[in-house]
Structure formats: structure tokens, C-alpha cells
Amino acid sequence: MQLDFREIETKWQKKWEEEGIFQPEPSEKPKFFITIPYPYLNGNLHAGHTRTFTIGDAFARFMRMKGYNVLFPMGFHVTGTPIIGLAELIQKRDENTIRVYSQYHDVPEDVLVKLDTPEKIVEYFSKEALQAMKSIGYSIDWRRIFTTTDETYQKFIEWQFYRLKEMGYVVKGSHPVRYCPNDRNPVEDHDLLHGENATVVDFTVIKFYYEKDGERIILPCATLRPETVFGVTNIWLKPEEYMIVNVNGERWLVSEEAYEKLKYSDKNVEFEREINADELFGRFAVNPVTGKEIPILPADFVDLDNATGVVMSVPAHAPYDYVALQELKDSDYAKKYNLDEILNKIKPIVLIRIEDEEGIPAEKIVKEMGIKSQTDPALEKATKTLYKREFHRGVLLEITGEYEGIKVSQIKEKLQKDLIERGIGDIFYEFSEKPVVCRCGTKCVVKVVKDQWFLSYSDLEWKNKVLKHLENMKIIPDYYKEEFRNKIEWLKDKACARRKGLGTRIPWDSEWLIESLSDSTIYMSYYILAKYVNAGELKAENMTKELLDYVLLGRGRVEEVSKVSGLQTELIERIRRDFVYWYPVDMRSSGKDLVANHLLFFLFHHIAIFPEEYWPKAIAVNGYVSLEGKKMSKSKGPLLTMKRAVSENGADVTRMYILYTSEYDSDADWRRRDVESLSNHLRRFYELIIQNYGDVEGEITTLDKWLISRFQRVVKETTTAMESFQTRRAVNSAFFEMMSDVRWYLRRGGKNLSIIIDDWLKLLSPFIPHLCEELWHLRHDTFISLESYPEYRDDLVDDKAEIAEEYLKKLISDIKEILKFVKAKKVYIALAEEWKYEVLRLIKDEKDVKNAMKKVMEREEFRKMGKDVSAFIKNVLKERSDGTVEEVDEKRVINDNLEFIKRETGVEIELNNEKVPKTKRKVSIPGKPAIYAE
RNA sequence: GCGGGGGUUGCCGAGUCAGGAAAAGGCGCAAGGCUUAAGACCUUGUCCCGUAGGGGUCCGAGGGUUCAAAUCCCUCCCCCCGCACCA
């Protein structure tokens, strides 16, 4: 095939760039500002980017053709640690990295090994990314490109953080992270050998205590169910060595493992002495909540490596505790430590009730499951089952005092807070699963990072503003609005500073770098500035707080700003006008992975910093891309780069495939076979247009009208689909459905395909812009990319023409069906008897057989042939539920198309009532003639 | 566990909101045509039965509402994604 996609594509890309047609400036036209999250450059752009960006570009092109002044910019994100990590791996010649980056990212090995600094990586991949995006034909305004380490960008970020700090949204605090003591670093999922699924859970510590020689020793019981403190009957220790440790001035008794973990908490911890649990069994401790004295007892099920290693026993609600107590009664321990009397006095204390159930819950479930020993693995299940039931349905009883009546599901946080405030509670962080092991082989711990900077997303006022604005936004697909609602409510304060990585320092605390998601929240406004930065008109030293306050917020007086920033007032006003014109963001289109993080922060920060008229209007979310059913992975492969997809298949094929293969948030699968098939479709399309693009000649036939009518429907469907961001539906309609009509048109002998070609090309232009541009220029000198999108025209819809074609299709299909069973040379067709038309006209509006019958039988001529008439009515009502009479000139359609029908069916056709036997004519109805094959 | 989404013909997927002949479109497969030939193109077929355009089955499972259910209601089973400080 002579068609070379790439040749055509590069030709038009060059022309678009030369003419600068995607470089919008403020104008009289309504504006549309669409943005896509800039890519993170620790590798080449891949099929996932291709999907998100192509959807955005198709929409940008669509809106442009719809008459909007469209701004579609792009930047590069390099802030954070992964690029630094990559540089280190390349320095080390890490085998996997070298393999993945040469094999999947298509970086030549000799080039790759030289990328041993973050700067070189950024330089290399930004060039690659730029080329890739140009090669696929995105209609981006490249004058606004930037990188997040640009000095000017950093000024912008500093400004943002000052603003947030002023508003009290940047605060200090501490938070738990997964941490490797050996590497002395927080660890991410991909740094782990085991335990990727482990999350950090916060045990509530309740400070039980005993006193000896005037010294108070705290028994820090760790629990996930603090409310059960009201039902504690005793404390469990494992009969082994413990330690007395000084924690913030208090003496805590904890396991050795717990001591190790406490070292990484935000507490001051100091070892004092060892102590064997032996010494304590049979002695009493005080429950700080109830003031009651309870005994300390031995239990083997206690896990020294879980939280503090000190456990409070709630036999009424904890199956473990219940069984352990039972077992203890007849054990050696009871004798050894003289516990009989104590044990006899212990009675489970019920503090939670589910509806009107009776008895002791733990006892019931243990008996039901037949559990006898504290080492029985079934205890785990019993615990879970009971916990789940009580969590969802349980209510606290009178014994819990002020907490009576509260649902178990709503008590944990409140109680934890109350205990801490009263000085008798604390928090102990622990992994939900163990072990958690770093790639270096070291067991990870939970480290509490102190004096960390936070963005206070949990601020209720802030949250409520975001929630409220969300209701005014368009979210695509719409069910993501609920998702956003939930995520906004769930969002907690976020640590926004790091010790390591690329990025901007916190301006008032230069020890810290601003974390990479926190510096990417309102950068869409920076695109306005970037144009001036790139033109050399705006430099870092000009970007003072006053300037940004003025151009982004309209604050201050321009003369003052001019003085401070060193810029001419004229330029300052121009930047301000640009901002006012382009903002807010009308559409942010993104992959679904960013919903629970970036897109939330995007909303929060816009709402915090800008006045309401500049808050985002809409968010669209799309799914992932897999390769032949396999998940892509940047760091492990497989991966398909944008560059490779384009060079192997062409930009238009790549674009259309990715737009067509799935919709909304459902995932797309890149399949070579399907891509190649699509490539053939486009070649066919190209040939088709080349062969049929000409002047419209002769009279417009019914068939032509049919084509135009069908096309109108496609225009409507495609437009509706695009307006709701459904590219799959749009491509399906604009290309495939139309193609199938066009094939029928040509098969029917249509000669004037050109009637629709101009508009058809326009319709397809957002999806396959290069091919459309090429074909358009066969007869035009303008850029199709700047033409107007076809408008649906109701007056061109021709129902009669469409019904006639349907009639013909159905007739041919019926004849073929019959010929399957009867070998014949000639087929006679007879229209339905005249009286049937008459009857049909009479009962047009009747749906009910009875009424229809009544109405018809009022006429004498029909009464005479009562049986035939009633059979017909039943038949026709069954066939056509709407009972309409189709307005087709059947005789004419058949006679005009005798040759065509013959060609399609392979037999002679004759419209001849006489030749068709009466029995066959009997079943005919208007619109469905009798057929007789001979 | 919590939250969000989903289960339709060999596969991918429309149809579900607004109940009314299930299966648009793509892929794959098959047959015929075109061609020196083809992985190219055109046409047809692709749940089952049928020597007359017809009949039957069918939408994860099971109930219910209705003249009528893939669609509405209830119960259950299964799958995917997120639960963070990481881009």
C-alpha cells in the first residue's frame, strides 16, 4: 500500500507548528481551558499517558471546532524522589533498571548509562516526551511548556505556600511512616520485599498501673477496641522477660520488641531495667478508667511482637481472653502462681449489646465453634466474626457511663481522644500484617516523623467549601461525584514536606522540600505565566509575592507591583488580563489513579487560594491501559511507549485505537492484532475518500437523501457522545457506523458520496486529524483543524427515504431467507391486498386487538371477509407493536430496484400479483409483501 | 472491613438511568467473490431447531412486581479498583 501514515502526519504537524494554529490568545470568542496532569518524567511517555492525553486532545480539537478559543497547555513534572532514585540505580548499573529502560522505555543502552544524574534524566526524558507528544499530533500550545524545577516555577510554588500558611492551612505535626532502620529512610511499596499490603494501624494504649515501693509502673495495654476497657477483668502478660522503660518520664512495662519500636515513635524512650513477668502474676493493677483493681495473669497467646506486649483481658467480648481464662483454671500456671482464688472471682463483664441478644457473646461463639484451647487457630475467626458483628450492630451499655447508647462503630476515635486528653491513653503504631521487610533485608518499623509540615485538609471549613463546590461541578463519569464526595470526607491532613528529592524548599523552613503532590495543585495558572517566562519577558527575580498577588488574585496596585517586581505596568496588566480571560480551568481530564490524591488537592488548593469564579468547572476521569491483557509497569515492564506506538502504527491509528477501545474509567487493552486491523480500516477509508471526493453531479436522488439523512443522525450521535466525553461512542458512530452506511450507499449505486465528505472529514478530525487534514486539502486550502464542527440539521433528516431503504433491505433479506430453503430461478412479489391497507389505516391508533377488531367490523365490506380480516389484524399487531402504516411507495421501490435486488439475491425478480398463490398472499401485510419462489 | 465500579453471544463491548421484537460496533472464525497471490478488499453467516420469510433459548444465581424485565425490587455468589503521604 502506498499510503504512508507517518509521511502525512509529519507534514501536517510541521504546517500546524509553522502557522502556530494552536497558540491561542484572548479574543472575543468564548474560551475553553482544558488541562491534563503533566507527566512525571522518570521514564518515557507510555500507553497510559497516550490514552489520557489523546482524550484531552480530541476534546480540545472538538471544542475548538465548536467555536471555542481553546487553551491546551502542557508541562513536565520532575519533583520528588523517583528521578533521584533512578539516577542512583543507573549509577549502580542496576540490572533490572538497565533491562527495563533499554527494553521497554526504548532508551539506547549507551545513552542510558550516561543518565546518572537527576538533571540529565530530566533533560533526556523531557526532550523525548516533547517529541513523542508532537509526533502524535496534540494541539498543545508549546509556548507554555515548563519543568517543575524551573526557578520561576519555584517562585510560584513559594508564593502558593506563603498564601496557604497565611490562611493557616500549613501546620506542624507528626505522623507515622513505614521506615527502614538500616537505610534510615521511609520505604515505599516498591522498596519492600514483604508486606506491601501492610497498613499502619493505631492501637489505643490504656495506661493501667500498679505501685511498688512508691513507684508507679504503667502497664500500657494496647487494644484496637478501647471501649472494652469497661469490661476488663485482668491483664495478660506472657511469662517471659519484659522491660521497664522510661517513656516521657513515665515507667512503662513493655516487651523488648515494643521497646525497639518505641524508639522510633515521637516519644523519649530510655531503657531502665529488665523484669520477668513472673514477679507480677497474682498481683493487682488499677484500671485507670474504672478505678477497679484487677489481677495480672499469665497467658501464652500474648504476642510480644505485637504492639506493647501487654494485653487487657475482656472475656465477655474477646474469645481469646475467654478461652485463656478457662484454660488457666486447670493449668500448671494456676498452681505455680497460686491463682485459684483469683480465678474463681473473675466474671466476664458485658458492655456491648446487639439488639435483644442475651448472654456473654464471647462465651456463646466459643461454644458454638467448639473451641477449647487458646492455641486453636479457629479463635482468630471467632474474634473476627464477633468483632464484625459488634462493630456494626453493637451499642454500648450503661456500664460505659457517659458513652452509653453510642454505637460501637462510632466510639473508637472519640474514646481514644478522651483517654489521651485525660493522660491515661496513648497511641501505639503497628503494622496490620507482619513481617514487613525492606529490600535490604531489614525488618521495617513504624516511625513517627516529628515536626513535620502538614496541609490541614481535615479542616472542616475547608472541606465543606470543597464539598459544596463539588456539587456545582461536572464530574465525568457522573458516578465519580460520589467517589469524590467520599474521598473528600476521608481526606486527612497530609504531610507536605520531605527531606529528600527534587523540588522547591519551604520558603520559611529551608530544611524541608515541598512534596511533589503538594506542588502540583494550582499550576494550571502557571501556564499563563510560562508563556512570558519562555519569551524572556518574565524572570525569576520579577516573580515577587506582590506580582503574583496582583496577576493571580488581583490584589494590590499595579504601580507598586511594577516598582517591586521591576516590570512595566503594561506587561503586568497584560498578564493579569490573560489570567482573567483563561481562568478558571474548564476541564481537567485525568487517569483514575489521581482521584484520591492529585485531583482532591487540585480542588482544595484552588478553593483555598482563588476566589470562587476561578474554581475548576469539570473533571473527567479515564481508566488504565493494559498490553495484551497484561498490566503495564514503568519499573518492571511490560510497557509500550507513545513514541513506539506512533512509529509502528502511525499517530492517527494510535489515536483512534486508544479512543475507540474503551470508554470512561473502564480499562483499555492494547492488542496488536486489533491495532493492525484498525490500520486497515483507516487505509480503506483513505482510499474511499480519494476515489469519491469530487464535485456533486446531477440531481440529488432519494438514495443521496438517504445518505444525508443517515449522516445527520451520525452527526447528532457523535456530537452528543463528545459532549459527554465518550470517545468510544463518538468514534463508533462517526467512523464505523457511518462507514457501514457508506458501504451500503455505494453498493446501491450511489454516485455522490462527496455530498457528505466535507462534513464527514470534519466530524472525524478530532480523532484522526492528520488524515483528515490531508484529505481535506485535496479540495480546500484552509486547515480542517480550524473549521467548524458539523451541526446536526433536523431538516435534512428524511424519514421517508430511510424507511424506503429499510424496506428494501428487509425485502432482500426475506428473499434470501426463502432461497436458503427453496432452489428457484425466479421470485415473484405481490404487495399486500388493497383492503389490508385500508384496514391498517383504520386501526392505526389501536393497540388492542379487541378494539381494533370492533372498529374494523363496523364496516360491512370487512364483515363479509371476517375470518381473513381478523387473522390479519392479529398478525399485524403482533408484527408491528406500534401499528403504524409505513409510508413507503412499495411498488416504486421494488420496480426501481429490480436490478439491484436481482444482483443481491441472484434470481430474477418480478412484481406480479397474479403469479403469487393466494396462500402466500394471505400472510402479506403492508410493508411486507408476499414472496413466491418458483 | 469500608467505599466506588462491574458480571450481556468465542473475545472486547453497546443496551440498564426513562421496562416493550436482546445482542449496535469491533475482533476472531467460516463460506463465497475479487485477485497471479495474499495477512489486502467486497459480500454473507457466526446461541439452537427449521426443505418459505418461522419457532425456541438467552443477559452471574435465585425469588418478586408487571400484560411485558438484561432493564424495577429483594436475597445470594463472583470479579476489578482505592484506602495515602507515593508519583
Image (cartoon, coloured by chain):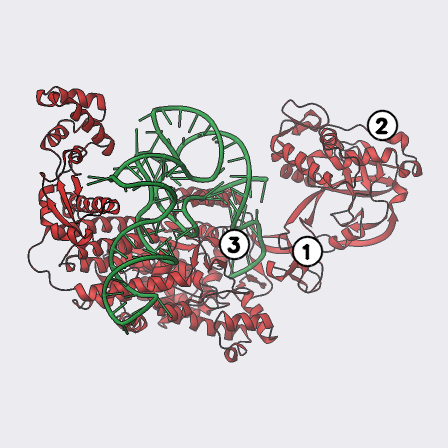
Chain colours: A red, B green
Image quarter (top left, top right, bottom left or bottom right) of the N terminus of chain A:
bottom left
Q: Position of residue A736 (x, y in %)?
A: 28, 55
Image point (60%, 33%), residue name: A392
Distance Cα–Cα, label 3 vs label 2: 58 Å
The residue at which mark 3 appears reads as A165
Q: Nearer the viewer, residue A101 or A904?
A: A904
Check contact, mark 3 vs mark 1: CB within 8 A. no
The residue at which mark 1 appears reads as A436
Image point (23%, 34%), residue name: A879
Camera-near label (3 vs 1) is 1
- Relative to A859, is A142 on the left or the right? right
Regarding mark 3 in the picture, which secondary structure is present there?
A: helix
Q: Up-down: is A524 above or below A828?
A: below
Labels 3 and 2: the sequence-earlier one = 3
Label 3 resides on the chain identified as: A
Q: Position of residue A834 (x, y in %)?
A: 9, 32
Query: In the rendered structure, which amino acid carries the disc numbered 1?
Result: Val
Regarding mark 2 in the picture, which secondary structure is present there?
A: helix
Picture quadrant of residue A204: top right
Regarding mark 1 in the picture, which secondary structure is present there?
A: loop
Label 2 resides on the chain identified as: A
Picture quadrant of residue A773: bottom left
The residue at which mark 2 appears reads as A345
Camera-near label (3 vs 2) is 2
Query: In the rendered structure, which amino acid carries the disc numbered 2?
Result: Lys
